[in-house]
Amino acid sequence: MANRVSHALHAPERPWYREPWPWVLIAIPLATVVACGFTLWLAISHPDYLVLDEPQYQAVAAGLKADAKPGTEAGANADAKAEAKAEDEEH
C-alpha cells in the first residue's frame, strides 16, 4: 500500500523537450533573429538612394525651404544653410 502511494506522488519526469517553458524561452531569441533577418533584408532590398546631381538637390532644398515657415527655427536653419551653400559656391 505504501508503495502505491509513493508511486502516485512521484510521477515519472518528462524530458526537457516535452515541457512548454524551454520552448517559450527558445522562441523569444529565435523570433528576434528572424525579425533581424527580415529587417536586414528590407534594408538591403529597398535602399535610400542619395541625391547625386545638383538640380535634384536644389529642388529638394527649395521644397524644404518652402515648407518651413518664415521666422521659425526650421525656417531660420534653412535660410542659414542656403546662404552657406551659396557662399561655398561663390568661392
Image: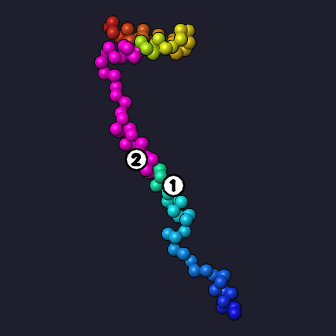
Look at the image and tell me whether residue 81 can be seen.
no
The 10 Å Cα crowd at callout 2, few under 14, some 14 to 19, many 20 or more, is few
The residue at the far left in this view is 53
- Where does the image place residue 83, in percent across and percent down from the top left? 42, 8
**Amino acid under label 1?**
Ile
Work out whether residue 31 or residue 89 is closer to the camera in this orientation and state it. Answer: 31
Q: Could you tell me residue 23's position as x and y percent?
A: 51, 62
Mark 1 surroundings: few (<14), some (14-19) or many (≥20) residues within 10 A: few
Give the residue type at disc 2.
Gly
What's drawn in magenta, residue-wise? 33-61
Q: Quadrant of the C terminus?
A: top left
The residue labelled by disc 2 is 37
| Side (left or right) of 48 relative to 10 | left
Q: Which residue is mark 1?
A: 28
Secondary structure under the numbered disc 1 in the rendered image = helix
Q: Secondary structure at mark 2?
A: helix
Comparing 77 with 47, the one in front is 47
Query: Looking at the picture, how far across and down is residue 71, in whole percent?
Result: 56, 9
